[in-house]
Each structure stands twice: as structure tokens, then as C-alpha cells.
Amino acid sequence: MRLVITKDYDEMSEWSARYIKKRINDFQPGVNRFFVLGLPTGSTPLGTYKRLIEFVKTKQLSFKYVVTFNMDEYVGLPRNHPESYHSFMWNNFIKHIDIDPNNVHILDGNAADLIHECNEYERAIKDAGGVELFVGGIGPDGHIAFNEPGSSLVSRTRVKTLAQDTIIANARFFDNDIKKVPTSALTVGVGTVMDARE
């Protein structure tokens, strides 16, 4: 692991977008060689996503041969709800780049069988050849995705009950009403993230 300290958010966003661009371009993805990228949601990656969109628009980067797997999704929130991670990713990133929507994977928090959904997500990652680069934001308490402090280091994609602190923190996205915040989510595990090549 390497720690990169930048002077501010904008510099961090620029650095991370350039790093992602370099990793994808150096990989030289193609028809039989897709780059598998793990992605987060939340406010932290927004600057990075905006910069990646600029790289696509200026033909410095293409997502044509990229497969993505998102880290998490709320349970029970309709896919088209403005705070669902499906909506977040579509509105802030996916619809602005040249990726095949069939290559975008986001957990289904409304699946009839949530455990099966989690198991199938793990299988899909494996079938895609594993994640080449997993991008993640770290929360104030050290959480990544919905893996709260104390989560097993070998955990896999699963259903997680959200900690009260997380519900309170996320209330800002739900009219500051904690009763509107989902109490559980599907999340990749720490082990899932650590399996990535980077």
C-alpha cells in the first residue's frame, strides 16, 4: 500500500483520475481482455468521476472494454430513488462515459433473495477474472463500503445491518430524517476488496 497526500480535494480527485486512466490505458483492454474496475459511491469520488468523464470526452480514455462492480447498495430502496446507488452511479458517471451498460454491475437491494444476490455478485466478479483495481473511499470511522469497524478481514459480499452512526451520517441525503434512511445494505466484503490485484 502507498499513501499519497495531496494539498486538497481537487488535487486528490485529479491524482486519482489520472491514476485510474493510466491503469486502464496501460492494461490495453480489448475484446478478449476487459479491465475490471471496482467503484464506490458517495461524495468522495465525485471529483474523480468528473475528471474521468473529461478524459473520455477528450478521447484520452475509453470505458468500452471496462467492466465495473460497485461496492454497495441500500436494501429496499427502489432502483430509481434519487438516493439509490444505481441512480447515483447512472447520474454522476455511467451515462456520461462510453461503457456498455451490460458491463456495469451494481448490487440489487430489491432482489427476492438477498443472500443469493450476494453470492451471484461474488461469482460474477470471479467470472470476470477478478477486480484489477478497486477504488474506495474511507469513511471517518475507517469504514469502506458498508464494512463498519470490526468487520471481518475475510468477509465476502453480504447483507449488512447499518450502524446507527452510519444511519445518522446518511440522513443528510434523506431530508435529515433518520426514519427515511434504509437500515440495511448489500456490500462487498473486506475480503472481496482485498482480493483485487490493486
Image (cartoon, rainbow, N blue to C red):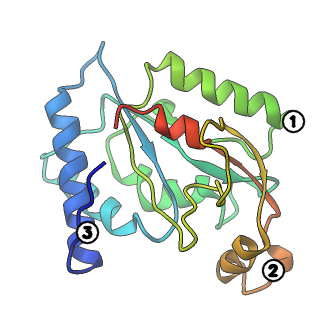
Q: Amino acid at mark 2?
A: Ile
Q: Residue at 23% across / 70% down in the picture?
A: 5
Name which of mark 3 and mark 1 comes first in the sequence. Answer: 3
The vertical placement of 32 against 76, above or below, is above
The vertical placement of 12 against 147, above or below, is below
Element type at mark 3: helix
Place residue 107 in its image quadrant: top right
Nearest to the eye among marks 2 and 3: give it.
3
Q: Residue at 65% across / 56% down in the picture?
A: 146
Place residue 100 in its image quadrant: top left
Residue 86, how many percent across, how many down? 60, 52
Decide which of 106, 6 is in the foreground and name it. Answer: 6
From the image, which quarter does the C terminus lie in?
Answer: top left
Residue 174, how many percent across, how many down? 72, 78
User: How far separated are the C-alphas under marks 1 and 2?
Assistant: 25 Å
The residue under label 2 is: 178
| Marks 3 & 1, CB-CB < 8 Å contact | no
Q: Residue at 43% across / 19% down in the picture?
A: 129
Q: Which mark is residue 12?
A: 3
Q: Amino acid at mark 3?
A: Met
Residue 14, how many percent across, how many down? 20, 65
Name which of mark 1 and mark 2 comes first in the sequence. Answer: 1
Residue 88, how many percent across, how many down? 54, 61
Left or right for 132, reference 179? left
Decide which of 108, 118 is in the foreground and name it. Answer: 118
The residue under label 1 is: 112
Q: Amino acid at mark 1?
A: Ala
| Marks 1 & 2, CB-CB < 8 Å contact | no
Decide which of 96, 105 is in the foreground and name it. Answer: 105
